[in-house]
Amino acid sequence: MPELQEIELQHAEPVEAPTQKRYFTRFTRHQRSLHAVLFSTFLGLAATGLPLRFSESYWARKLAAGVGGFGAILFFHKFCALLLTLAFLVHVKDVFQRGIFHREKGIFWGPTSMVANWKDVKDLFGHMRWFLGLGPKPRFERYAYWEKFDYWAVFWGMIVIGFSGYAMWFAPFFARFLPGWALNAALVIHSEEGLLAILFIFSIHFVNTHLRPDSFPMDMVVFTGVESEEEFKKKRSTEYARLAAEGKLEARLAEAPPSWYVKFSRIVGFTAIFIGLTLLVLTLTAYFS
């Protein structure tokens, strides 16, 4: 019997060990922290700005009564504005520090840049053809064209909405070198641009980021900072192929996110989406009433 068992072991087919699922870093902890400040303060600005914009609405008056009046709402609005401004300035500092002082390639131009290029134009029209069944699905780099559009929409909003908001906040200072009509225009610009930003983020951005078939019901990478190799290949196949060809793929290897952190991130994400959609409904209700 021992001899028979030895013969069977010698001729047995080798059993392949299960391959371990690999994860790759997409966002650093610093980038995720700035995004956390961004979306939390934006929710705060929306939740406080909308009652000020539609102060005659029933829900706005009830909210004001529950928190101590419209003066309290304005205080929290300004507080969120300060935090968001600080995060924006830190981001701008990081970009210029990496691009100018550290001479990091790809910050202002190239496949890893947030600046739109000719490939984004081709991807846009290629995506439209794919939607209509007239061509293959485009292969995307580190950032797709809609992600760049989202980025610059927020960047534009920070400048326009931010400047008009501070012009109203510190009106005596700005009145020293701005005419009176400019301060009146700042009120209109701040109100309408803020409303446009809320409608964009809570509809277009939510759909592009979380409700696409590739990410539904939620894209977790901005919370965990990592994505699986299968997800990497599927969503950003051109970037995956480029890093593999350059021999830089292994440098992006990361640990799998803890299950508790994934669950916690889902709770935070779904809560943010619920608040955003609720504010969107209240905005549309107040706007068309």
Image (spheres, rainbow, N blue to C red):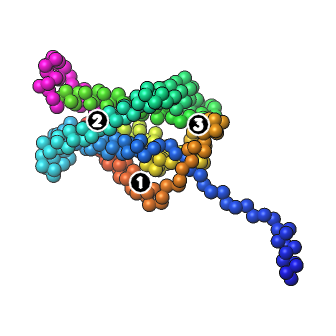
Q: Position of residue 110 (x, y in %)?
A: 53, 27
Query: Of the residues shown, which amino acid type is indicated by label 1?
Result: Ser
> Which residue is tagged 2?
85
Q: Residue at x 39, y 34 (%)?
A: 94
Question: In terms of secondary structure, where does tag 1 sit?
Answer: helix
Is 257 within the magenta?
A: no
Which image quarter: residue 28? top left
Q: Which residue occupies 57% across, 43% down?
A: 251
Q: Give the residue type that dot 2 points to.
A: Thr
Q: Which residue corresponds to mark 3?
A: 239
Magenta residue span = 169-197
Viewer-proximal residue, 188 or 38?
38
What kind of element bears circle 2? Answer: helix
Disc 1 target residue = 265
Label 3 or label 2, whichever comes before in sequence order: 2
Report, in whole angstroms, how far the alpha carbon at label 3 lies from the one at label 1.
Answer: 26 Å
